[in-house]
Structures are given as structure tokens and as C-alpha cells.
Image (spheres, coloured by chain):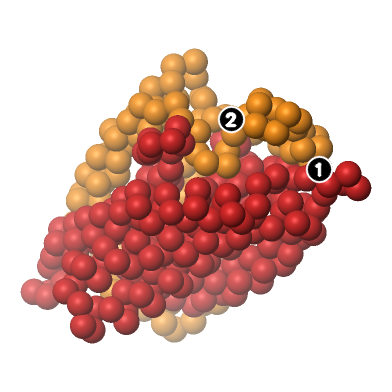
Chain colours: A red, B orange
Amino acid sequence: MHVPDGYLSPATAIVSYAAAAPALAYGLKKVKEDFQEENLALLSTVTALSFMAMMLNIPIPGGTSGHAIGTAVIAILFNPYFAAVAIGLVLIIQALLFGDGGVTALGLNIFAMGITASFVGYYAYHLTKKFLNEKIALFFSGWLSIVCASVVIAVVLGIQPLIASDPSGKPLYFPFDLKVTIPAIVFSHMVYFGVAEGIYTLLVISFVNKYYFKNENSA
Amino acid sequence: MKTPRNVSKKRLLQLLALFLALTPLGLLTSNPAWGEWGLDYFKEKLGFVPKGIKSSSELVNAPFKDYRVFNSNLLSQVFSALIAIALIWAFFKLFLMFRRKKIFSNKNFTKNENSIN
């Protein structure tokens, strides 16, 4: 889901930076208010876990692959602002040091995997845990968070041939339209990577609750 | 947001170590992600490479492109993750240090006293 350089028209890149940057700046302000020394170990751990989860490419039928992103875990354990900032940091490191995801596409990648997934994961969990079993709520929040992120990416990529082609009609940037991107990106996340994200969310949060916060009640 | 009290950081290190050990599994597939193809993919599918994609494919020269730190893929995968862990921890640590200097409120002062232990 890391959109590379060259896939987005300049206008799209600018608009996505304009959408992601203020949101991230506001997130940083919120983190500044709430972040305490005792959160450092857990926040660093789950952020690093997201980085590593994104390295674990899962092959799927059709010759492509994908991965979990781990955003919902951070949103649920902390809040969506922490998650947006943490995933923003992960995506910046990936783009600048490892060439994974384009620098011009950073705005879109942060908007989708950082901001969208954070808020969807957080609210999905807090709304569904009222009437769903905790484990199902965790799985569902993870699933929905990455599926929504994939919708953002699919729509933005899919409109590129409509908004940027040369006079002869040849696309200048990403060439496939929504009829191609929606099934390829969104369906693969609904069926495969969403399930991976759901399982990841359930397992990591269960682990943290059981082993990291275990003395919380007795303290 | 929960604030941990008597917590075991050892468990978090175990979780990190587990994922670190899993990172080489990411090498098992050579399938690219959908939409993260090389230039030849477009050439093959469309008969041409869209101008914008061609011209900016080498826009950024990432020092460890494709998570390659060494010649060995396996070691590269693990070292890439270690670099990321260090940077992430350093970022949040510096964020805390920088923030503490700027606003030295009562709340932060008492928190600092507690966290000495």
C-alpha cells in the first residue's frame, strides 16, 4: 500500500500533503500534551512493531503481496493522535531511508495508513466493544482500519488517469482507473490483509493487556 | 489511555525480539505489492511507461533501498528493523526531553520525580 514516487500527479501530491500535514501537526500537539515518560517503552515498541509488520509481506493469489500496518493497535492502546504520529514517523523512515513509499506520495500514505486507519480503528473499537465480544471488536477494528486505508489509496490512484493525461489521452501518472484499483486494492485488503490486520490487532493488544498491564489491577 | 504502573518491560523486549526474528519471513515472497511495480511492468501491460512514472522513478536515493543494508538479504532485513527500532525510540525519547525543557509545569515535575525509580 506504499504508493511510490511518480504515481501521483503533482496536484494530487500537493493536496494530500495539504491534508496530512495539518492533521499531523495537530496530532503532534496532542501527543505533546499527553505523552509521559512511562509511555515511552510501550509506544516505541508498538511503533517498531508496525514497522516490522510492514516488512512481513504476505503473498496472495494473482502474484502480488501485502502486509498489516499495525495502526489500530496504537490507536486503541493510546489514542488516534498517537497512532497518526507514530505511523507518520514509520512512513517517513521507510520513505527516506529504505525507499519504501515515495517522498512525493508521503502525504497520501500518511493520510491513508496513518490518519484514516487511526481514527477508524479507534472509533470502530470504542463503538463495537459495547455490544461485541472484546476479541471480536479488536479483530473487527483492525480489519476495518486497513480496509478504509485501502479505500483511500484505491480512490486516489484510480482517479489519476482521469485528472492527468497527455493530449493523446495517454495517462501521465498512475494509469489504471477505479474499475481496476477498487477490486485489486480494496478486495485484497478485505479478504487477506484485513484478516492479517485483525489477527495482529487482537494478538498484540491481548499480549500487552495480559503481560504488560498485568499488575495494573493489583497495584 | 492507560498509564502503566508496575509493568514488565521485559515482556515488551520479548515481543520486539519475536518480531525481529520474524522479519526474514518477509523475504519468502518475491511478489511485489499491487501498485508497487517496476517500470517494465507498465511497459509490458500498457506498451509504454507513463511519463511521470518514468521521470520520477529515481527521484529519491534512499541509502538502504529495498531494505538492503548488507549484501545478505537475511541480515539486511534484521538490521533494517534494528535501525528503525533505534530511530523510533530516539525520536520519542528526544520528543520527551525537548518537551520537558519547554514546558516545565507542575504536572511534569511530579511525574519526573516518580519516574526516577
Question: Relative to B38, does residue A175 appear above or below in the rendering?
Answer: below
Residue at image point 64% right, 42% down: A4
**Residue A133, image x and y in percent?**
16, 74
**Residue A18, image x and y in percent?**
72, 67
Q: For numbered disc 1, what is the local secondary structure?
A: loop
- The amino acid type, in three-letter code, at marker 1 is Lys
Q: For numbered disc 2, what is the local secondary structure?
A: helix
Residue at image point 33% right, 31% down: B25
Residue A194 falls in image quadrant = bottom left
| Dot 1 crowding, Cα within 10 Å, few <14, some 14–19, many 20+ | some
Report which residue position mark 1 lands on: A170
| Dot 2 crowding, Cα within 10 Å, few <14, some 14–19, many 20+ | some
Q: Of discs 2 and 1, which sits in the foreground?
A: 1
Report which residue position mark 2 lands on: B65
Image quarter (top left, top right, bottom left or bottom right) of the C terminus of chain A? bottom left
Task: Tell me if I can see residue A80 in this picture.
Answer: no
**Residue A103, image x and y in percent?**
68, 46
Residue A93 falls in image quadrant = top right
Q: Which mark is residue B103?
A: none
The chain containing the residue under callout 1 comes to: A
Q: Which residue is the extreme one toward the right?
A: A167
Residue A78 falls in image quadrant = bottom left
Between residue A105 and residue A216, name the one nearer to us: A105
Question: Relative to B96, does residue B83 appear above or below in the rendering?
Answer: above
The chain containing the residue under callout 2 comes to: B
- The amino acid type, in three-letter code, at marker 2 is Lys
**Residue A145, image x and y in percent?**
41, 64
Q: CA distance from mark 2 to mark 1?
A: 30 Å
